[in-house]
Image (spheres, rainbow, N blue to C red):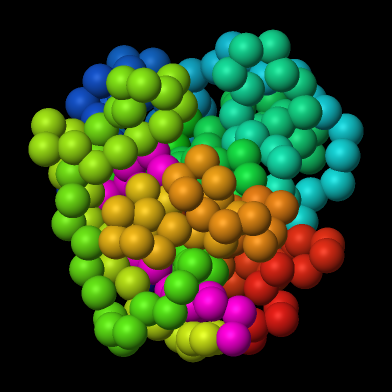
Amino acid sequence: MRILIQEQWKGRNIEDLLRNEWKIPKKLIHTLRMDKAITINDQLANWNRPLNHGDEVFISLPEETDDIAPYPSSLDILYEDDYLLVVNKPSEMVTHPNNNETNTLSNLVVYHLQGQHKGQNPHHIHRLDKNTTGAILFAKNIFSQVVLDRMLADREIKRTYWALADGVIKSKNGKITEPIGRDRHHPTKRRVSKTGQHAITHYHVINTFPKDKLTLLECSLESGRTHQIRVHLSFIGHPLAGDQLYGGSSTFKRQALHARNLEFMHPFLLKKIRVTASFLDYPPIFENYI
């Protein structure tokens, strides 16, 4: 993995960047040091030497087991560089293999990256439900993964969703703070539960459609619980249209939820990344309401 030292990092050393800029776990830092895995301008790294703008850092990463089979199919790529990529997931596709599946989004990404990163696997940084569409972020190697995982946990990666909810929501903005836990009566369903995990969903009404009894929302999360938006909107009496698992209407063939925007500061290029995922449904769901 190759990283060029940015102007903002001039005068800092590689150990400082690993520990304080990218906040790499101590175990991985120790492995990189013991393996002499970092060079600077083709010379074995002096971990305490101040860096200059434009210095070339090369990191030899531990080889990973290739446990996801490639699946040949096209991808809607929203952004890609040497470190990460953002893909627009269609409906009827899971993010990552759970058993022996070979046609998940991760399988397609592995196929796309064949030959680019030998000995490295792509890692999804977050997931979307099978019938939720939109932007998903992948790291191209383990180093990028640990950085992006930490950024997600620290809410440095902003994700916004568009949703069509049943009924007309009168309040322009709202915040739902109910904890979410498993539904003991259903193996995959979640529910609001006093003993559940902390969960906060913010929503903003983009438009209402009284004739169709629908509300177009933009939602953002302070947490990432399974089915969070679906559970929370159902709890306030406005389930996602098409989401029959949580009491939604049969207006659409799937829950009307789309990961619309993804925004973050690139940890290695120090530039703002903002992508917007187009709608993929046919017949269309969201296009008739924007």
Q: Position of residue 182 (x, y in %)?
A: 30, 28
Within the magenta stretch, is there residue 228?
A: yes
Q: Nearer the viewer, residue 32 or 85?
A: 85
Dividing the image into 4 quarters, which one contains the C terminus?
A: bottom right
Dividing the image into 4 quarters, which one contains the N terminus?
A: top right
Q: Is residue 276 above or below residue 47?
A: below
> Residue visible at 76% across and 36% down?
108
> Residue visible at 18% across and 51% down?
178
Q: Quadrant of residue 10?
A: bottom left
- Residue 22 shows in this picture: no
Q: Check the image and name the residue furthest to the left.
A: 194
- Residue 123 shows in this picture: yes
Within the magenta stretch, is there residue 91?
A: no
Q: Position of residue 158 (x, y in %)?
A: 37, 64
Q: Which residues are magenta?
A: 211-229
Q: Nearer the viewer, residue 248 or 82?
A: 248
Q: Nearer the viewer, residue 86 or 26?
A: 86
Q: Is residue 137 above or below residue 98?
A: below
Horizontal relation, residue 198 to residue 84: left or right: left
Q: Nearer the viewer, residue 59 or 63?
A: 63
> Residue visible at 45% across and 26% down?
188
Q: Is residue 252 above or below residue 22?
A: below
Horizontal relation, residue 169 to residue 243: left or right: left
